[in-house]
Image (spheres, rainbow, N blue to C red):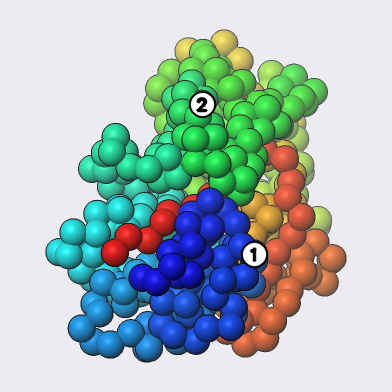
Amino acid sequence: MDSLITAAARALAAGDPLGALKRVALRNDAPALALRGIAMAQLGDLVRAKALLRSAARAFSPREAVARARCLVAEAEIALASRDLSWLVKSLEAARATLEAHGDWLNAAHARYLQVRRLLLISRLEEAEHALAQLDPTNLPPALKAVHELVAAGIALRRLQTKAARDALARARIAASQAGIPALVAEVESATLVLNTPAARLIANGAERTLLLEDVEALQASKALVVDACRYVVSAAGKAVPLASRPVLFELARALGEAWPGDVPRDVLLARAFGAKLTDESHRARLRVEIGRLRRMLRSLATVSATKSGFLLAPCRAREVVVLARPVEGEHGAVLAFLTDGESWSSSALALALGTSQRTVQRALDSLAAAGRVTAFGRGRARRWMTPPLPGFTTTLLLPAPLPSD
């Protein structure tokens, strides 16, 4: 690389995209296009950044395989930042293999972290954890060490392991400070705030209060029977009964949990589970069937018995029954939960992360937009959705900018 290209790369590594652009803004050779693309990505113009990187990849000759692979890695990073999760994973894997074959271990490691972060975003925690365990950050530069610890913290947060998350964030803070990249330092601080903001609501004995993640972890380890409306699970004493695929049964369990130690009238259960305003014998018969199914599923944790007016939930061994709910609830809550990270998401990326159809997500987004809860920009495939951040959800990882090596 010539002196201007080297200086621009060092400016990007230090988190100074404007300094990099001052050196290469008027150049259209392949290395300059690549650095301009990375600079525009750091400035937030992801569309322009993507176009510049593609131009750079085309400008490099076929013999410059490493340079082309670096452009692919940078483009994948931009796709991750713009929540375009449908980008070709095989292309990134091929680029990583090329970088490793040519001894560019730094950028190859960066490609691996992109793969892990994508897995984390789409909630494939086991795969993300396994992939992260294969990466050794010991000899990496501070920026990538910070990314490693941020990913580790993200996994720990989703598994409700708050001590492990705090330790990982403490290491990330040290590494980010050593890297001297303001965006990375800000991301670590933002992720740390998650541990000190409301993450859920506890509903018990007719009252409710907010909980931190630490409190949620303690609740899950307590002797209470927890009806978890965040993960659609009923759990107690280390045993869990998933009800995510049985929404009617879960709604019945939640209604019974909120009323504990009292019972719930039949008309209330019919309204909560079936949305029935006017009921007849067919509705009551269906309620009896669903209560029977719930009784069988929860038989190891609790009993569901009939009372004069309705039904009563009684734990087998737990001391009390509590309901754990999201900080903000309402229709299409799962879509809102992903949008609260403050980033812009495409409907296809949301569908991939939620494990549902894109059309279902589009209907939810249209409904939320009509209510003024989300906004959209762009058209066609470039259309993105976002909403202001809400407390209680982990922020996303910002992009580091390691210095490209020859």
User: Is the residue 381 above or below the residue 233 in the image?
Assistant: below
Residue placed furthest toward the left: 101
In the drawing, does residue 131 fall left or right of residue 30?
left
Quarter of the image for residue 393 reads: top right
Q: Which residue is mark 1?
A: 18
Residue type beneath disc 2: Ala
In the drawing, does residue 133 fall left or right of residue 268?
left
Residue type beneath disc 1: Leu
Q: Is residue 328 visible?
A: yes
Query: At numbered mark 2, what does the secondary structure look like: helix, strand or loop?
Result: helix
Residue 366, image x, y percentages: 73, 74
Quarter of the image for residue 108 reads: bottom left
Residue at image point 53% right, 51% down: 14
- Label 1 CA crowd tier, 10 Å (few <14, some 14–19, many 20+): some
Residue 8, image x, y percentages: 51, 65
Q: Which residue is mark 2?
A: 170
Residue at image point 61% right, 32% down: 192
- The residue lying toward the viewer, choosing from 377 and 69, is 69
User: Is the residue 75 above or below the residue 170 in the image?
Assistant: below
Residue 271, image x, y percentages: 75, 49
Residue at image point 74% right, 46% down: 390
Q: Is residue 162 visible?
A: no
Q: Which disc is residue 247 wearing?
A: none
Query: At numbered mark 1, what does the secondary structure look like: helix, strand or loop?
Result: helix
Question: Which is more foreground, mark 1 or mark 2?
Answer: 1
Residue at image point 63% right, 36% down: 189
Quarter of the image for residue 133 reads: top left
